[in-house]
Amino acid sequence: MPPTPGAARLPSSPPSSSDTSPRDAGSWKDAAWVVVPAWVTARVVVLAALALARYLSDEVHPARAVVTRTAHEGLLAWDASWYADIATRGYGALPREALRFFPGFPLLGRGLGVLTGDRAALVLIANVAALGSGFLLYRLVRWERGDARLASRAVWFLMLFPSAFVFVMGYADALAVALAIAVFLAMRRGHWWWAAVAAAPVGVIRPTGLLLAVPILVEAWPGFSHAVVRERVARVVAVLAAPVGTLAYLGWVAATRDDALLPYSVQTSARLHGEFDDPASTVWHALEGLFHGRVGTALHVPWLVVLVVLVVVVFRRWPLSYGVFAAVVVASSITSRNLDSMERYALFAFPLVLAVADLTGLPARDESHAVERIAFVLVPVALFGYATLAFLGVSVP
């Protein structure tokens, strides 16, 4: 990790949710010195994984057709192919399973596709959004903690998180994460209208986008009774923005398919993620996969432990809204029978990355930064490994 300008000491305790005093969020130039190298590194790692997957597919000639397909679909494999089909053909030409992919991302791809082609546009949007998420996260951490080194670690972990290889692919996740960070940056600074503007599209980008209403409510409620009427309206609009976006899409589904909840019922069908289940049964089902050769399923089990630990760290080290957001997103990710894509779903809860950044920071008296150095060796290796497994069709991203 390159040296970070303006590094500051970590405060002894995190700021409270009600603290909106002016702070230094750092300059965009400072952010660029961190974000651009991290963003480029992640793309080098993921593209190297794709090259390896294609080489193995071409040279080994695996018996499973899915290996050849995902390796050669590359950045438009798995869910990215659904987004590409929606952008190019529309929902009407696709089976109802396509409805589980919300329209915000493919519609944006269709709009930009006039210049680049719909499929290329999706990959371009995802990568630009990933770059934007890095800048926004750096500014947010600097504003919250005033610690440039912590902000730098957070950005690198966001870019190199094992499931963040989808930020390089034609997936909606990078855009959703960028907007979620923008929501926090706006509402923590008391800019409620901007928070609403950022939250509304998330409701039509990801099925879990409406969960943003929970942390916004946590921030909006304190001081609500003492706020002027105009600010009260802004806070209410911010809370409702993401759910209204989701309801708009569900309303369209109801008008065209006579069942507003089809996007969710399709997602929870037995063939995909299965119905909601208690976490204990979910873990046991994942462990069974280990004994039946389902490597991708078994990999989810240690992540369950890691995610729970990170949620606890967020609650202890960051304002309440961060912890609540991490908790509701993780909970929504582990309550279905099938844990496929769990790590990717959990990445929407970007405060988990902040917890990792906190845990890898050492006290100022220890200048070796050993934990940090080890982490920045292991994390890109894990990113490469997960990306390779996904491109080989072994693990579902």
Image: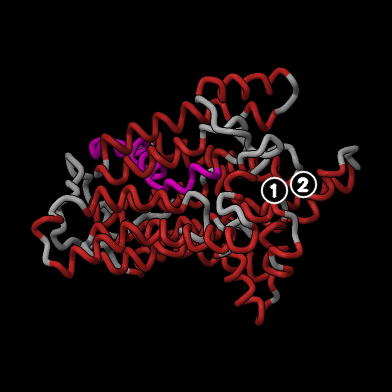
Residue 245 forms part of the magenta stretch: no
In the image, what residue occupies the spot 67% across and 32% down? 296
Q: Helix, strand, or loop for circle 1?
A: helix
Amino acid carrying label 1: it is: Ala
Is there a contact, CB below 8 Å, between mark 1 and mark 2? yes
- The stretch of residues the image draws in magenta is 344-368
Q: How is the image coloured?
A: secondary structure
Q: Residues within 10 Å of mark 1 (few under 14, many from 20)?
A: many
* Mark 1, residue position: 49
In the image, what residue occupies the spot 46% across and 55% down? 177
| Quadrant of the frame with the C terminus | top right
Q: Give the image location of residue 4, x and y in percent.
A: 34, 56
Q: Reply above or below: 146 against 201.
A: above
What is the number of the mark on residue 306?
none
Is residue 236 toward the left or the right of residue 385 in the image?
Answer: left
Looking at the image, the residue that sits furthest to the bottom is 115
Looking at the image, the residue that sits furthest to the left is 226
In the image, what residue occupies the spot 17% across and 39% down? 12
Q: CA distance from mark 1 to mark 2?
A: 6 Å
* Mark 2, residue position: 53
Q: Is residue 47 visible?
A: no
Q: State the residue in front, 217 or 362.
A: 217
